[in-house]
Image: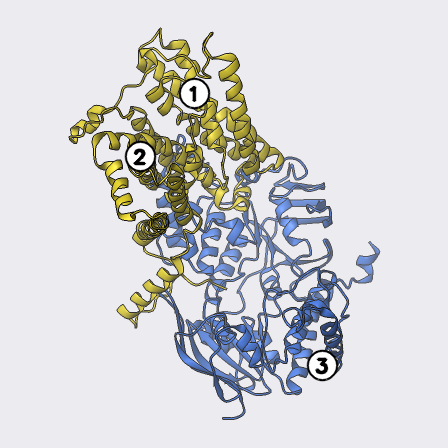
Amino acid sequence: MSSPYEKLPGWVEYVLIPLINLVVAFLVAGLVVLIVGQSPIKAASLLVQGAFGYGEGLGFTLYYATNFIFTGLAVSVAFHCGLFNIGGEGQAYVGGLGVALVCLWLDGIFPWYMTFMVAVMASALFGAAWALIPGFLQAKRGSHVVITTIMFNFIASSLMVYMLVEVIKPLGSMAPQTRTFLEGGQLPRLDWLLAIFGFDIGGAPFNLSFLVALVAAFFVWLLIWRTRLGYEIRTMGASPKAARYAGIKDARIIIITMLISGGLAGMMALNPIMGDQHRLQLDFVAGAGFVGIAVALMGRSHPVGIIPAAILFGVLYQGGAEISFEMPEISRDMITIIQGLVILFAGALENMFRPALVAFFATLRGAGNPSEVSTPGE
Amino acid sequence: MDDLAIELKGIDKSFGAVHANKNINLAVRKGTIHGIIGENGAGKSTMMSILYGFYQADRGDIMVNGSKVIIRDPNVAIASGIGMVHQHFMLVDNFTVLENVMLGAEENAILNRGITKARAELKRLEREYALDVNADAVIEELPVGLQQRVEILKALYRSAEILILDEPTGVLTPPEADHLFRILRQLRDQGKTIILITHKLREIMAITDEVSVMRRGEIVATRETATTSVEELAELMVGRRVLLQVEKGDASPTDVKLAVTNLTVRDGRGVVMVDNVSLDVRAGEIVGIAGVAGNGQSELLEAITGIRRAESGTVLLDGEAIGATGEADPALLRKRGLAHVPEDRHHMGLVLSFEENENAILGYHDDPEYLNGPMLNLENIRNSAQESVEKYDIRPPDVRLKTANFSGGNQQKIVLAREMERDPIVLIIGQPTRGVDVGAIEFIHKRIIEMRDAGKAILLVSVELDEIRSLSDRILVMFAGRVVGERTPEATEGELGLLMAGVEEDQEAAQ
């Protein structure tokens, strides 16, 4: 019959549990550092110092976070529809092709903001196009989107190698990358934004894409919770049977959701390509598509959670780089282990501490007012 | 006190803020059938789960045969001689009866010895209690009544002296239920103790020796069955007087609003679920479809409402054909005046993780009233939800509350309010009161009658025969996907029961 009423207060659900998971992840990571014979305290302080301690570090942290906000949003939109889009990596990669083509075409003609507007659209369109086929196959043929998006990551990788080596590499160049964009293809950095807070970002590539990411987060919130389409997406995700009953066209919603998800992943390419490198290089996504999955899980698929989760992973990337620089005994792989632990505890084991907390809060309430009897519906 | 099989002393259990069992004191005498009755959410299942070791009580003691036992998990319960027959059978469908009975009691890594022993033991049990089942039959090929018998054998095989049956007749036809009761009486006569959990008052009266009534987590009364009445038990359950019979005037049906002709539906595996069914529903009448669950009623409703595609046949809604065999479209049907209260409230009728107001527009979410261009008009949505919450007395009256936090009866009211308030022409209702408490049942039945009197054509499907008989103006009985007979509500339960079991009359067989 009715299931036990196990609900936790909002602040526990959304703040305390992620925090506990995070602390445990860091404790275990600390153990690993200890096993290698290094000081976890030193590593931790380097991590924080490297990520927040000075302007350039902070700039890098936010630069990485920008990537993760885009890919985290992409994964979360699909989550709301019950789809697991693992193809953010490939969609962002192909999105980069869109950005690069626009910049190569327009950078000598228009000022950066004109190029930028076209590039935003191109990145979203290319990313969406790369998600279209998996979405279509899921909607019309029932081919699982997890499988197809993974395969499309590989196809994207090969496609981009081909494009860079055979098609858009400048004549005579030995490197598989495009030429460097002119000023019309370069995004301004946001040094002024951090300067307000007294930070000098130095050489950090923190750029306008960050603000675009925040705007995208707002629009995702608007889409999911305030539009009819979002309502239909959430209904599909929560209960496909209810969606069918409500007359929601499942194939249509699946394809549209995948297009939006792919588009958001594609927009991630703006940050490294137009904002930092000013050219298209091999493997520029560098795993951000996969980190997006962890970010979406940790952020509970809500933009308000995704932004801090993305910043956290920005910290791990930037602070981690700092650790491996300052403590050569801790290699780059160790940093990957720490990131893996965070993903493990925040994502896969997110409910590990829940039963204990439920019991704890139940006793708290019981002890507080033992006579209170709540009968919902009365 | 040594003749008590089970004694619960001061059992108390809370789940978070919900106090599911409050100071429960229950004494079950050896060799009796003891009924536990109460509304959904009254705490019956929690109490039995504590007794069977699924949950631990916060306070209180359990005495089995006069000595205190701490039941940490079901293994302890089994070792103490307690067996449970669950509402949803815990059987492995593609195993044989013998394999299922042995499961968890194999004794050896090599099965040979265990099989020989189990077979002999099964034979003995069958003889002793007249529980005939073919030990080598595969479960999925057995009818539901026999599957239940296997569950009982499983408990007896583990030397259960005390059997708990949780809503055992929910899936049975009336003749199957009668047979089950004969078995239970025989078990009792041989000294077993039986605890029967049910919400059907008539079963309590028919078979129990004693009955305990639960309300809001408490046992409010224990009576000897012979000294009580259905009316008294109902009043004890709800806490106030209830009308068990719906009052309704005669129907005055007019035009045919829903006409189904030769409808055939196959399921995903190609099995014919609805077999050449034809029926008419007129404005101002309630047509009830009786039948044991799984005889094609669900598929029929889904085909009519456009959720499932029919293989052949036609459906006319208010005289116009709806593409039952073509691209089905529930959204379009809704716009044309077909409202649908689905059988599966939890997965189809509602999205439990949504707020109440979001569910109040499910299926009607593209009504311009609720939209501002592509945006949802939250103000209108919440206001209209607030209105129907008040009109249908949905509690708590909080349209922002998550739907999962409403009780079953109130969830059903959310669906009913949504489907009834939009002035449909045809109203399709599946299992209107499944999992709904008695107080809400009265309310829901009244609303359905009101809709009829307002001239709606209503097609009602329910596995509760009482409900079909008290609401319907005409009764169709479905068996194995076909309509095997039509009766008036005056038909006796025995007559309907035979039809439900597939025993056809000559005239219908001849057609």
Residues B277 and B144: in front is B144
Residue B410 to residue B422: above or below: below
Q: Chain of mark 2?
A: A
Q: Quick check: marks 3 and 1 in contact, CB under 8 Å?
A: no
Residue at (25, 43) in percent of width and height: A45
Could you tell which of marks 1 and 2 lies nearer the N-terminus?
A: 1
Residue at image position (19%, 27%) is A200
* Residue to which mark 3 is pinned: B129
Badge 2 crowding class, 10 Å Cα cut-off, few under 14, some 14 to 19, many 20 or more, is some
Q: Chain of mark 1?
A: A
Identify the residue position indicated by label 1 in the image.
A281
In terms of secondary structure, where does tag 3 sit? Answer: helix
Q: Quadrant of residue A278?
A: top left
Chain ID, blue in image: B
Q: Which mark is residue B333?
A: none
Percent coordinates x, y for residue A54 in the rendering? 21, 33
Viewer can see residue B256: no
Question: Which residue matches tag 2?
Answer: A325
Mark 1 Cα-neighbour bin, 10 Å: few <14, some 14–19, many ≥20: many
